[in-house]
Image (cartoon, coloured by chain):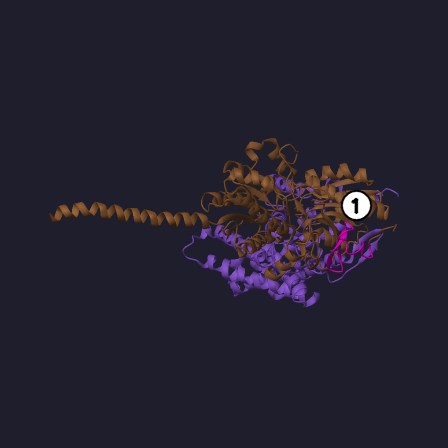
Chain colours: A brown, B purple
Amino acid sequence: MRNDSRSAVSPFGYSALVLAAAGFLGTISSQALAADPLKIGVIAEAQAIAGASIPQAAQMAADEINAKGGVDGRKIEIVTYDNHSSSADSVRAFQRAVNEDKVNIVIASYISEVVLALEPWASRLKTPFITPGAASNEISKSVHADYEKNKYTFHGYLTSAALALSVCDAAKELLVDGKHMSTAVIMSEDAAWTKPLDVGYEECLPKIGLKVLDHIRFSPDTTDFTPIFNKIEAAKPDVIITGISHVGVQPTVQWKNQQVPIPMFGISSQATNSTFGKDTNDAANGVLYQGVSGTGVAVTPKSVPFSEGFKAKYGNYPSYAGYTSYDEVYYIAEAVKRAGSTDADKLVEALEKTDWEGTIGRVQFYGKDDPFTHSIKYGKGLITGLMLQWQDGQQVAVWPKEVAKASMKFPSFIKVTSN
Amino acid sequence: MLPQPKSMRALQILIDGFAVSALYALGATGFTLIFGVSGVLNLSHGAIMVLAAVAAWAAASVLHTGTYAGALIGIAAALVAAFATYFAVVQPIQRSRRIPNEEKEIFVLTGTLLWGIMIQELIAYFFTNNAKTVLPIVEGVVDIVGVRTPRNEIFTAIVCCFVIALLWVLVNRTRTGKAVLAASMNPRGVTLLGLELNNIYIVVWAIYGVLAGIAGVLLGMFLGVSSYSVGPLTASAFSIVVLGGLGSVSGSLIAAFVVGYLETLTAYLISPAYRTIPALLLLVFVMYIRPQGLLGRR
């Protein structure tokens, strides 16, 4: 009887226990689902000034969103990886982020070569991926060429083609109309991002009235720029149009030490760093560079609070990729809200509908039928970029008029003939 | 707007090539001296030069010590790093009983290479991999028959030549120097003369540290350095020294000028993008026809 009674009772008892346990586990997992964090992997160049701001800015945005309750109750978690500026390390980090750390989306790198190496992995692992700072046209052209495969990649920064347009738009007003300049020499480093940039320059400079006298491409590991500047000077242009990012400090210092009497104007990514003045011992004074943001420049109402908040938190102003990275976390959060899911395909669809006023302007992506699919749109009312100049150790916006704080000013060795 | 006359360009090449070559020569001299005397190929050479430049930059620009004090701090940093290389990396390997004698050279090579990478990563960690430039001691430009030349470039060339001359006097005219010279010719002979080989090594590493420090600081003033420069600097010193003949100081000097001028000529006459290629081709060619280098003894 005892046995019987036990056998009669115990199955019931067990199943009740199992049911109760299952119920308990069920509530845990459904609670866990609701509170499952939205994981964003951030792969960046921790040792480079441009790259170091990327994870910091992403974390700052995540903290702000989390403080306001997160995304539909889900916290944002930033998982960071240092890629040592290497494509191979980046690919490994990407695989690890997706396969082991189970991130929902990845923000990565300001180097075009790295981004181009990651793009096929975003496709293979079907994980949405946004770059905050690379520029090569090829990133979004590949999305256009094979949309179904490459739709996971988004280009959260201007393409080289757009950068060239931005430089030309500024040059038209500042140099051609303002200083009656008529000739230019293009000086650019040999890298993936400058190939389309140079094509853009060659096309738009003559249109705005700057005749291209010569075009000098040099290896990004060049240290002695003397021959380059001498060659440029021999061509006697009114302005040097730059396309430099891997180099910056060295040509700038040598430009000043050699007293090259021609202004430099264009893309000089390192000049966007707030430490550039100190790194060059103020040789930077007079350098004109394109940017999407600048310390103290209110491109949108969000720009200045972001850069000041960043400075208060990390001790230095963000690099250009910091601004875009910060915006990206916000519009990813928006997209997740709209999609109601972190499913990759749904997230891609939602990201395509992005219309977000961030720190660098209004972010929208080009569509499937545009040549630069998934790249941010360039133009008035969206993102136009700025032209800034180093003046007395400070970065000052000089274009467009709406945000300009000062007019151009050159060191004494520069000969700008007409005013 | 006259086109640039040919003679002007020739003069430009002559002037710019000289400054770069003199700097290469100074950088390579210490490297070859160490090899000549102690048989050590110090692959942390580039890292020590960059360390000197970054220390000088940090002292002058972050701590505001002034240009001269900054330069001295840079040289001191290189001296400390040179001693650290010898005492912490090279000497333990040379004295180890567990490493077979015939493998010690390879161990020293690997050890100094890793040590160089460690220094490089530390610099990148603390100061980022962005390039730094040391504020020049002399600023401005002078006109040399129509060629506008930075005073700093002339200063660099003069200091390099002066230091190399000083080294020549030290090696050939002083007792310590003669002992160093003797050690490079026949280490066993020196010990038979009652000189402590170990002390000679310390002297050589001290000379090396100062030379690498001066070269690093001048490089920081003239061209600028970043943690990325470490590899190329070691490689450039290595190829100059191999071209000139391992261990031969005069061979290195000649090779430095050959490489410096070849690079400058290429940059001016062909394209700055191909700057280093002809010098490397020359190296390969010399290795074929004269494996011991231009003035090598072995």
Q: Quadrant of residue B166?
A: bottom right
Q: What amino acid does circle 1 point to?
A: Ala
Circle 1 residue: A171
Magenta stretch, residue numbers:
A389-413
Q: Quadrant of residue B135?
A: bottom right
List the single residue furthest toward the left: A1
Residue A135 within the magenta-colored segment of the rendering: no
Which secondary structure class fits the magenta region best? loop
Q: Secondary structure at mark 1?
A: helix
Q: Provide residue A35's location: percent of width, then percent of height.
A: 46, 50
In the displayed structure, A49 sits above or below A152; it is below
Whether residue A238 is visible here, answered yes or no, is no
Image side of residue A366 versus residue A75, left or right: right
Q: Nearer the viewer, residue B130 or B69?
A: B130
Q: Nearer the viewer, residue B220 or A2?
A: A2
Residue A410 within the magenta-colored segment of the rendering: yes
Question: What residue appears at the point 55 percent right and 47 percent down from the top-left corner?
Answer: A333
